[in-house]
C-alpha cells in the first residue's frame, strides 16, 4: 500500500510541475481594448478643506478594474474626492495587468498657487537616484513641500527618487495646497545581461521541463530567445504569472525590468 501511495505522489508531483509550466511565455496579452474615460471633474471651492473631485470609468479590457491617483494605492472605487487644486494622473489596471492613464487638472478657487519643477533622471536600478527641484509662484509665501508625509522647507528639492510618478504637495502660508504629479524619467541603468539577468533566468525559468530545449516551449537558455521575448518576460514577472512554480523576489523582478527598459542588451 505504501509503495502505491508513494507512486501516486510522484505521479501527482510530476503532473503538477508540468501543469505549472503549461502556460507558455509566448502567449501575448492584448491590452488594446482597454480604455480609461473621464466622467466628470469638479474644481475645489475652498483651499481648506479641499473638496475637489474626479470621476472616471473603464471600458473594455478584462474586469475587475482598479484605479489609482498619482501612483497611490489601487482601489476598486473610480471616484476620487477631497482633492486640492493641482495636476493628477489617473491610472487604470485590469485583471490582465493592462494599464491606461489620463491626466486631469483641477484649479483652486481664488488662489493662483502654482509651481514648476526640474527633474533629474534615475539611473540606479534598485535604489533610485533621481531628483526634483521646485520653483513655486503665486499664493502667499513662504512655501513648503510635502512628500510622503514629510514637510520640507527651503531648499525645495527632493533626492534619491526612483523612476516613475510621485505626488508632491506645494503649500503656502495660508495652508492652500497645490498637487504636483512629478514624473522622474528612467535613464540607462547599465544592468548587465551576463552578470545580473542571465543568472536569474537560469535559476527561475530555464530549468528542466519548463523553458529549455526539447519541451516545445521557448528555450530561455539562448540569449536570442530571451531578447525576443523580453517585454513578455518583464510583464509576466511583474504580474506574478512567471515563474509558474514559485514567487520571485521583488529585487529580481526589478532587475529584469531595468534590463528590458535599457533595451535588453547583450552586455
Image (spheres, helix red, strand yellow):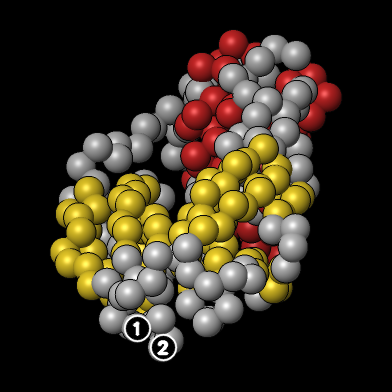
Residue at (59% x, 11% y) in the render: 224
- The residue beneath circle 1 is 46
Tell me if residue 68 can be seen.
Answer: no
- Residue 128 lies, in percent from the top left, at 74, 45
Q: Quadrant of residue 39?
A: bottom left
Q: Which mark identifies residue 94?
A: none
Image spot of residue 212 (x, y percent):
62, 23
Give me the residue at 34% from left, 83% from top.
46
Q: Position of residue 69 (x, y in %)?
A: 42, 64
Quadrant of the image containing the N terminus: bottom right
Real-space Cα separation, disc 2 to disc 1, in angstroms: 6 Å
For this rendering, which residue is in front, 106 or 111?
111
> Against 163, is 65 above or below?
below
Q: Quadrant of residue 120?
A: top right
Assign a secondary structure to mark 1.
loop
> Which residue is at the far right?
195
Residue nearest the viewer, comparing 7 with 177: 177
* Along the viewing direction, whichever of 203 and 161 lies nearer the viewer: 161
Q: Marks 1 and 2: in contact by CB < 8 Å?
A: yes
Q: Which quadrant does the C terminus fall into? A: top right
Identify the image quadrant of residue 198: top right
Q: Is residue 218 visible?
A: yes
Question: In the displayed structure, would residue 267 be above or below residue 12?
Answer: above
Q: Residue tagged by mark 2? A: 49
* Residue 188 shown left or right of residue 114 in the figure: right
Q: Residue at x 52, y 82 (%)?
A: 174
Q: Position of residue 133 (x, y in %)?
A: 66, 49
Classed neighbour count for the residue bearing mark 2: other residues with Cα under 10 Å, few (<14), some (14–19), many (≥20): few
Q: Nearer the viewer, mark 2 or mark 1?
A: 1
Amino acid at each position: 500500500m505504501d509503495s502505491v501511495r508513494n507512486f501516486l505522489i510522484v505521479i501527482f508531483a510530476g503532473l503538477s510541475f508540468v501543469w505549472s509550466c503549461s502556460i507558455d511565455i509566448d502567449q501575448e496579452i492584448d491590452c488594446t481594448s482597454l480604455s480609461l474615460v473621464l466622467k466628470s471633474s469638479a474644481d475645489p471651492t475652498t483651499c481648506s478643506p479641499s473638496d475637489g473631485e474626479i470621476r472616471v470609468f473603464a471600458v473594455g479590457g478584462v474586469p475587475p478594474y482598479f484605479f489609482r491617483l498619482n501612483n497611490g494605492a489601487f482601489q476598486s472605487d473610480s471616484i476620487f474626492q477631497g482633492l486640492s487644486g493641482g495636476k493628477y494622473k489617473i491610472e487604470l489596471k485590469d485583471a490582465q495587468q493592462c494599464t491606461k492613464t489620463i491626466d486631469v487638472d483641477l484649479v483652486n478657487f481664488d488662489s493662483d498657487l502654482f509651481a514648476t519643477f526640474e527633474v533629474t533622471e534615475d539611473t540606479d536600478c534598485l535604489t533610485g537616484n533621481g531628483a526634483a527641484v521646485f520653483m513655486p509662484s503665486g499664493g502667499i509665501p513662504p512655501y513648503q513641500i510635502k512628500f510622503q508625509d514629510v514637510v520640507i522647507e527651503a531648499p525645495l528639492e527632493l533626492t534619491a527618487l526612483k523612476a516613475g510618478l510621485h505626488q508632491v504637495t506645494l503649500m503656502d502660508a495660508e495652508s492652500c495646497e497645490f498637487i504636483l504629479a512629478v514624473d522622474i524619467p528612467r535613464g540607462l541603468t547599465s544592468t548587465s545581461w551576463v552578470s545580473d539577468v542571465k543568472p536569474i533566468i537560469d535559476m527561475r525559468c530555464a530549468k528542466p521541463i519548463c523553458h529549455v530545449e526539447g519541451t516545445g516551449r521557448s528555450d530561455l537558455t539562448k540569449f536570442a530567445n530571451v531578447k525576443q521575448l523580453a517585454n513578455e518576460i518583464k510583464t509576466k514577472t511583474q504580474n506574478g504569472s512567471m515563474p509558474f512554480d514559485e514567487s520571485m523576489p521583488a529585487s529580481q523582478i526589478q532587475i529584469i525590468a531595468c534590463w528590458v527598459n535599457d533595451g535588453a542588451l547583450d552586455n
